[in-house]
Amino acid sequence: NTHDYTQYTAVPVTLQFRDSSDYMDLCSADVKTEWFMITNSYHQVSRHVDLMFTPGKFVPVVPFTPATYPFCLKYPYCKEIIMLSQRWNPNHKQVILDMDMLYHTK
């Protein structure tokens, strides 16, 4: 890629472009590191990043938001995710935030 993000963040950034709009399959992503996070062009990577781990065990945290009005239901895309998930699990009450999740490739 020809994009240089070193002026924006000290975190190493590798760009991968999608074949279609707002979709990226993790199974086909060209990942060459042991740990990685994903983002998109709607987000900006900060110069300083604090990763979320459980205290003492260093197990990555899976971030989520509750399916309540202030956090999710007032946003049409989030409301749709909850409605679809409740088709197979009527008690489903949270949305996983995959853009903030730390992935381990090993």
Image (cartoon, rainbow, N blue to C red):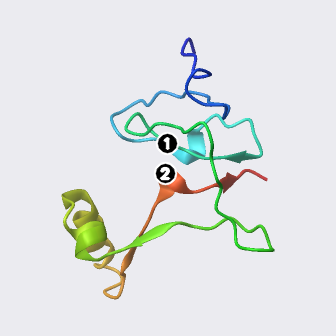
Badge 2 or badge 1: first in the primary sequence = 1
Determine which quarter of the picture holds residue 20. Answer: top left
> Label 2 neighbourhood size at 10 Å, few (<14), some (14-19), many (20+)?
few
Q: Of 57 and 36, which appears nearest the observer?
A: 57
What amino acid does circle 2 point to?
Met
Q: Can residue 84 be seen in this view?
A: no
Residue 96 point in image, percent of width and height: 46, 66
Q: What element carries label 1?
A: loop
38 shown above or below 16 = below
Q: Mark 1 points at which residue?
A: 39
Quarter of the picture containing the N terminus is: top right
Identify which residue is drawn at 46% across, 36% down: 44
Which quarter of the picture shows residue 28? top right
Could you give the CA–CA distance between mark 2 and mark 1, rounded to whole angstroms?
5 Å
Q: Where is residue 39 in the image (x, y as percent from the top left)?
A: 49, 42
Q: Mark 2 points at which residue?
A: 99
What amino acid type is highlighted by mark number 1?
Thr
Q: Do the residues labelled 2 and 1 touch (CB within 8 Å)?
A: yes
